[in-house]
């Protein structure tokens, strides 16, 4: 059977970029057949830019404050991505909402990572909201971006127990380790042509019928 071609990625960041690093590491290890064509940050001081540069990946700063509207900002991003033939966009800690300009340019081809088990606790305080609510399982979600905040079809999730004494930084750090596993995995599924969006659901073609054989179920408790 012919292998699927390498997927051309664009990664959008705003900060630390540890998820970007996880994607880079998966590519270097050979677990993910992808090429990062461009990393865009809306902030010039994003640490993730250095991570990309260290690996010889092209970077670009597109400062949202320099644009009159969200749409104009997105148009600049879309132009940069299309000029590099990007096929899939990964939002890796990108802290801006997307307008229809981006969504229409990459329909079903924008993934985001969020640090809660969606649809619980959308927004920017997932781990804190999980602790305050008192849930026993928190986690993270990779989903296809649609209009609205953290509401798109779910691709992969990993659960993380909330432990006695957890505060936001401690739980967020434990969740982040799982983010680093599932984001490259979700991109690999896309590259392998195994994701099919059916309404709200994402069908993973060829997925094992026995859940316990999946590395993403019952992640190790640290
Ligand atoms: C992650 O916790 C992610 O869930 C959220 O922003 C954080 C990004 O971290 N959307 P990093 O920049 O990848 O280190």
Image (cartoon, rainbow, N blue to C red):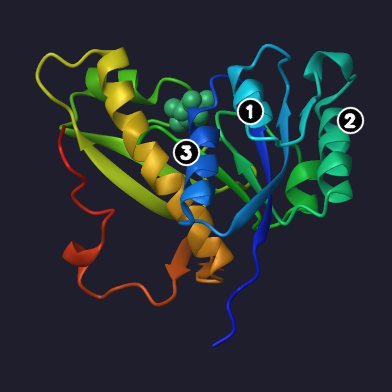
Q: Are marks 3 and 2 in contact (CB under 8 Å)?
A: no
Secondary element under disc 2, as helix, strand or loop, is helix
Residue drawn 46% across and 46% down?
183
Q: Position of residue 111 (x, y in %)?
A: 58, 47
185 is higher (above) or lower (below) than 173: below
Q: Left or right: where does residue 156 sit relative to residue 44?
A: left
Q: Which mark is residue 110?
A: none
- Rendered image: mark on residue 54: 1
Quadrant of residue 119 within the rendered picture: top left
Q: Which of the two discs, 3 and 2, labels the residue nearer the N terminus?
A: 3
Q: Position of residue 53 (x, y in %)?
A: 68, 28
Mark 1, other Cα within 10 Å: few <14 / some 14–19 / many ≥20: few
Up-down relation of residue 128 to residue 38 (above or below)? above
Residue 137: x %, y % from top left:
20, 36
Marks 3 and 2, how far apart at CA: 30 Å
Q: Is label 3's Cβ within 8 Å of ligand 1?
A: yes
Q: Is residue 1 above or below residue 24?
A: below
Give the residue at mark 3. Answer: 22
Secondary element type, mark 1: helix
> Which quadrant of the structure image shows residue 166?
top left
The answer to which of 76 and 131 lies nearer the viewer is: 76
Which residue ends up furthest to the left in the rendered image?
164
Distance Cα–Cα, label 3 vs label 1: 14 Å
Quadrant into which the N terminus falls: bottom right
Element under label 3? Answer: helix
As drawn, is 33 to the left or to the right of 63?
left
Residue depicted at x 24% and y 20%: 131
Residue 213 in sight from this viewpoint:
yes
The residue at which mark 2 appears reads as 72
> Between disc 1 and disc 2, whose residue precedes?
1
Give the distance between the C-alpha atoms of the residues marked 1 and 2, in whole angstroms.
30 Å
């Amino acid at each position: 059977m012919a292998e699927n071609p390498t997927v051309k990625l664009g990664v959008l960041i705003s900060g630390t970029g540890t998820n970007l690093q996880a994607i880079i590491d998966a590519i270097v290890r050979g677990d993910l057949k992808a090429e990062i064509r461009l990393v865009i940050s809306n902030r010039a001081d994003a640490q993730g830019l250095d991570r990309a540069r260290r690996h010889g990946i092209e970077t670009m700063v597109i400062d949202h404050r320099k644009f009159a509207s969200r749409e104009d900002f997105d148009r600049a991003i879309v132009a940069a991505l299309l000029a590099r033939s990007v096929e899939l966009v990964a939002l890796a800690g990108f802290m801006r909402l997307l307008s229809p300009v981006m969504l229409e340019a990459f329909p079903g081809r924008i993934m985001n990572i969020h640090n809660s088990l969606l649809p619980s606790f959308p927004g920017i305080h997932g781990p804190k909201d999980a602790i305050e609510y008192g849930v026993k399982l928190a986690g993270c979600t990779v989903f296809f971006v649609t209009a609205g905040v953290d509401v798109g079809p779910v691709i992969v999730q990993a659960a993380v127990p909330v432990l006695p004494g957890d505060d936001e930084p401690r739980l967020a750090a434990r969740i982040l380790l799982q983010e680093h596993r599932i984001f490259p995995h979700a991109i690999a599924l896309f590259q392998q042509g195994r994701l099919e969006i059916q309404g709200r659901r994402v069908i993973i073609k060829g997925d094992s019928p026995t859940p316990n054989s999946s590395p993403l179920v019952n992640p190790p408790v640290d």
